Amino acid sequence: MLKRISGLILIGLLLTACTARNGEPQYEVIYSLEAKKPSGAEQTGEALPPEGMESYTIGIVPKAMENPYFNAAYDGAREAAADLGMKVVFRGPQTADADQQVKVIEGLIASGVDLLAVSANDPARLVPVLKQAKAQGIKVITWDSDTLPEARAFFINMVDSETLGRHLMDTMASHIPENSEFAILTGALSASNLNEWIQWIRKQREEFYPDKKLVAVVPTDDVPQEAYEAAKRLLEEHPHLAGIIGNSSIATPAAAQAVKEAGKAGAIQVVGLSTPLLIGSYLQDGSAQMATLWSPKRLGYLTVALAKQYLDGHLPYNGEAVYNVGNIRVSGDKVIMGAPLDFTKQNVGQYDF
């Protein structure tokens, strides 16, 4: 994931907004990530994989197969499967469609997997089929995007939703002038994780940036061409638009491409979620200003590692050290992998996912 970095502390400035004397929000550093060259569990604080492991088959269901973000997660899942002596079946709909996801899950149930790990396109729509899986003795967890709690044992979240949503709003606000307009380009309107982030974007705007006007929230179903067309419509329908927040890894580069083609790079600020490989060229040419994400490969690894542990009869716990991932946070039935990173023109070339 990190290239050419050793011993560099990468700091994300995340916003829990205290209020300064002048009334403007003031931020404190609430996390840091130090990249190290691991040389054993003693130095990294991580437990090495156990030996003599029982083999299981895990069905991992992404929101969509045609999404580089989930391809990177699959790379991590395969690596974990190799380390842990397990089989991973990675299968999902071609695009982010809940009904097609149900059909995929039905097929995996019929194939006799030991556990399903699902990134849900719709939190309620998948509940009946996941309860069907549980009734047949298949364990169920969610990752990346949650279902309703009764459908799964626990949810593996990439980051804290409030922290991320507030951070996206702060990033947007720092790039656009006072009394300006911005829009959100999101994925599927049914996706629980995207909706949570939008909720916290809205709340942060109301609390700290009431002069910034959110003029539209536009869904794209995480289809690149749809996202690009939606971004072009935003530029046409809102001539005074100052910025776009991309609320998914597909949306942000699509917005940047539309801004670039319109000749408005730098005039309309683009920030949001994306992988360095997808957004890198746009950061370099000024069509996008900042992107935020976590490592999807690490998320895939963590999902398989915790799936194996759950199949062995153990739930994740707060502060647990997971090999190849680090220490996780657990609150109730939700796991938080870690903190996001910000990518800019200056540092995006240091990453390879």
Image (cartoon, helix red, strand yellow):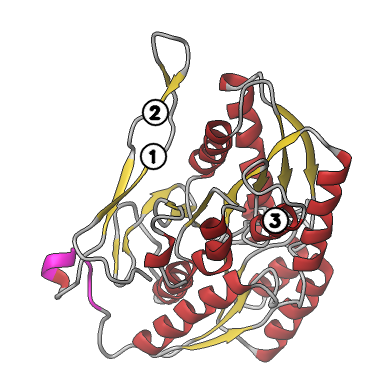
Q: Name the residue located 67 percent from the left edge and 72 percent from the top edge.
A: 135
Q: Name the residue located 21 percent from the left edge and 65 percent from the top edge.
A: 6
The correct choice, above or below, for 246 with respect to 69 in the image is above
Q: Label 3 sits on what residue type?
A: Lys
Q: Name the residue located 78 percent from the left edge and 60 percent from the top edge.
A: 228
The N terminus: image quadrant: bottom left
Quadrant in the rendering for residue 350: bottom left
Disc 3: CA contacts within 10 A as few (<14), some (14-19) or many (>=20): some
Image coordinates of residue 153 in percent, x first then y, are 54, 61
Circles 1 and 2, Cβ within 8 Å, touching? The answer is: yes
3 or 1: tag closer to the N-terminus: 1
- The question of residue 45 being in magenta is answered with yes
2 or 3: tag closer to the N-terminus: 2
Q: What's the mark number on residue 13?
A: 1
1 or 2: tag closer to the N-terminus: 1
For the record, the magenta segment spans: 42-48
- The question of residue 233 being in magenta is answered with no
Q: Nearer the viewer, mark 3 or mark 1?
A: 3
Q: Name the residue located 39 percent from the left edge and 39 percent from the top edge.
A: 13
Q: What's the mark number on residue 27?
A: 2
Comparing 291 with 43, the one in front is 291
Give the number of marks.
Answer: 3
Image coordinates of residue 139 in percent, x first then y, are 56, 72
Q: What separation in Å lies between label 2 and label 3 (alpha carbons)? A: 31 Å
Q: What separation in Å lies between label 3 and label 1 (alpha carbons)? A: 27 Å
Q: What separation in Å lies between label 1 and label 2 (alpha carbons)? A: 7 Å
Q: Label 1 sits on what residue type?
A: Leu
Whether residue 154 is visible here, answered yes or no, is no
